[in-house]
Image (tube, rainbow, N blue to C red):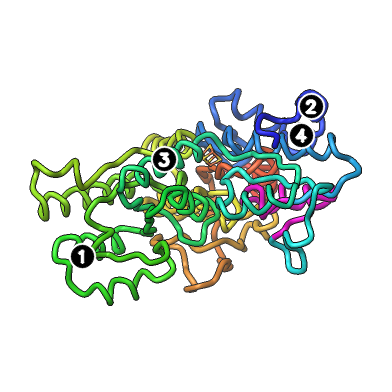
């Protein structure tokens, strides 16, 4: 198992730079995160794009290809939620076990498997080890920190309540950690509405059957809400909105207070802040951008399945018209844009659709555009978006 890279960092540095670097982004960073071009006034968030965990995971994947040129290399799924990065890895011959027709069944000692930044479940890890695969572990340190807390909950007899998305790989891997202790339990809650249902149950204990039906798929096997919601510890998927996680923590604390009283609170509720610093920095930078700049629109770049990107778009969408786009190809013209509807924002939304199209998205005249990108978006993609924006805003506004 390789956990700290494969000692080929320098050998792959040029390739990584050529695939993901952008000279334009360097220039904009050097110009106080601003770029004027024709009628465009672009304001870039001061923290955006690749986080330390993603940077490291992609670096290790390139090192793996270099170290094992003749062996089959697999990823358990997307290494990060960015289509361009995953496309490049596929082009380098790395296969994805999540692809139709590919699975872990036939893997053996000659195969190399890269574990993604958000980790894998303990059952998947055990299986790959049993099969004798060479493993390259890129699990981010911030995810490992969450696991450490969840393990401690399980060890001490607390159910891990995970604020996250039940189908997200990281949350599945985190929830699986509790199985390392007999009787370990977990429950995933998506948002304040689900937390409210759980808190009502903690207070009243009513309708356990309805509760288990409502949270089917989000609970560990044999979950009994009467037994397993007496002592709980809160953890988060690292990329959730910090404000929402804090609110959910307070809701649970209050419910435990109501049920058991202040003297017994510690015996029934624990919490650790497990939002990673990179996620928090990107959310803070968007908040600062919205506060300090007079923006007409906001563009958020990142994969449509990227949790942290969606949350950046939600944050911005609460304040102004926001377009979550995957890459520069979404900017069809100065009039037409393809984008993912922002949850709860004013953009036109098609329920259930990943992507929609809008017209008249770019205001005429001098236009002030705020821009950020999720933690899995490389500078090269951000640079291409800005260049494309520049094409639409080439001419100066007549005085
Ligand atoms: S978003 Fe945070 S937890 Fe996820 S890979 Fe990046 S630094 Fe690690």
Say if disc 3 is inside 8 Å of ligand 1: no
Quadrant position of the N terminus in the picture: top right
Which label lies toward us, 4 or 3?
Answer: 3
Question: Do the numbered discs 3 and 2 sit on residues whose CB atoms are within 8 Å?
Answer: no
What residue does disc 3 label?
A: 275
Which label lies toward us, 3 or 2?
Answer: 2
* Residue nearer the viewer, 6 or 46: 6
Spatial separation of the CA atoms under disc 3 and disc 1: 26 Å
What residue does disc 2 label?
A: 8
Spatial separation of the CA atoms under disc 4 and disc 2: 12 Å
Spatial separation of the CA atoms under disc 4 and disc 3: 27 Å
* Residue at x-position 67% and y-position 55%: 77
Q: Is residue 369 visible?
A: yes
Q: Which residues are magenta?
A: 75-97
Question: Do the numbered discs 3 and 1 sit on residues whose CB atoms are within 8 Å?
Answer: no
Q: Is residue 297 visible?
A: no
- Mark before the other along the chain sequence, 4 or 3: 4
Question: Which residue sits furthest right?
Answer: 70
Label 2 Cα neighbours within 10 Å, binned few <14 / some 14-19 / many ≥20: some
In percent of width and height, residue 5 lies at 71, 30
What residue does disc 4 label?
A: 16
- Mark before the other along the chain sequence, 4 or 2: 2
What residue does disc 1 label?
A: 201
Question: Do the numbered discs 4 and 2 sit on residues whose CB atoms are within 8 Å?
Answer: no
Question: Do the numbered discs 4 and 3 sit on residues whose CB atoms are within 8 Å?
Answer: no
């Amino acid at each position: 198992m390789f956990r700290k890279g494969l000692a080929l960092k320098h050998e792959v540095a040029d390739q990584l730079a050529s695939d993901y670097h952008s000279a334009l982004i360097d220039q904009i960073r050097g110009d106080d995160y601003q770029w004027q071009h024709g009628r465009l006034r672009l304001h870039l968030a001061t923290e955006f794009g690749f986080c330390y965990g993603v940077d490291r995971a992609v670096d290790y994947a390139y090192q793996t290809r270099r170290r094992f040129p003749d062996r089959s290399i697999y990823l358990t799924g997307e290494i990060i939620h960015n289509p361009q990065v995953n496309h490049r890895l596929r082009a380098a011959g790395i296969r994805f076990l999540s692809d139709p027709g590919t699975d872990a069944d036939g893997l053996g000692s000659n195969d190399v498997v890269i574990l993604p930044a958000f980790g894998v479940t303990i059952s998947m890890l055990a299986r790959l080890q049993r099969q004798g695969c060479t493993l390259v572990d890129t699990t981010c340190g911030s995810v490992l920190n969450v696991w450490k807390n969840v393990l401690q909950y399980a060890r001490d007899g607390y159910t891990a309540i995970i604020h996250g998305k039940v189908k997200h790989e990281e949350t599945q891997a985190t929830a699986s950690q509790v199985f390392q202790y007999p009787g370990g339990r977990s429950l995933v809650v998506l948002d304040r509405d689900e937390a409210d249902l759980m808190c009502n149950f903690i207070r009243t204990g009513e309708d356990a059957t309805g509760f288990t039906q409502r949270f089917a798929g989000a609970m560990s096997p044999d979950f009994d809400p009467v037994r397993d919601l007496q002592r709980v510890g809160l953890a988060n998927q690292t990329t959730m909105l910090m404000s929402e996680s804090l609110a959910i923590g307070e809701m649970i604390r209050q419910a435990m207070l109501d049920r058991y009283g202040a003297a017994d609170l510690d015996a029934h509720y624990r919490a650790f802040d497990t939002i990673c610093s990179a996620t928090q920095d990107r959310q803070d930078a968007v908040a600062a951008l919205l506060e300090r700049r007079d923006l007409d629109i906001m563009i958020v770049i990142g994969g449509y399945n990227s949790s942290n990107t969606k949350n950046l778009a939600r944050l911005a969408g609460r304040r102004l018209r926001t377009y979550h786009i995957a890459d520069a190809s979404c900017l069809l013209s100065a009039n037409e844009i393809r984008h993912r509807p922002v949850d709860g924002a004013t953009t036109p939304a098609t329920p259930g659709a990943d992507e929609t199209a809008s017209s008249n998205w770019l205001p005429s005249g001098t236009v002030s555009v705020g821009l950020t990108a999720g933690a899995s978006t490389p500078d090269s993609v951000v640079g291409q978006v800005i260049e494309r924006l520049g094409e639409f805003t080439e001419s100066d506004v007549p005085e």
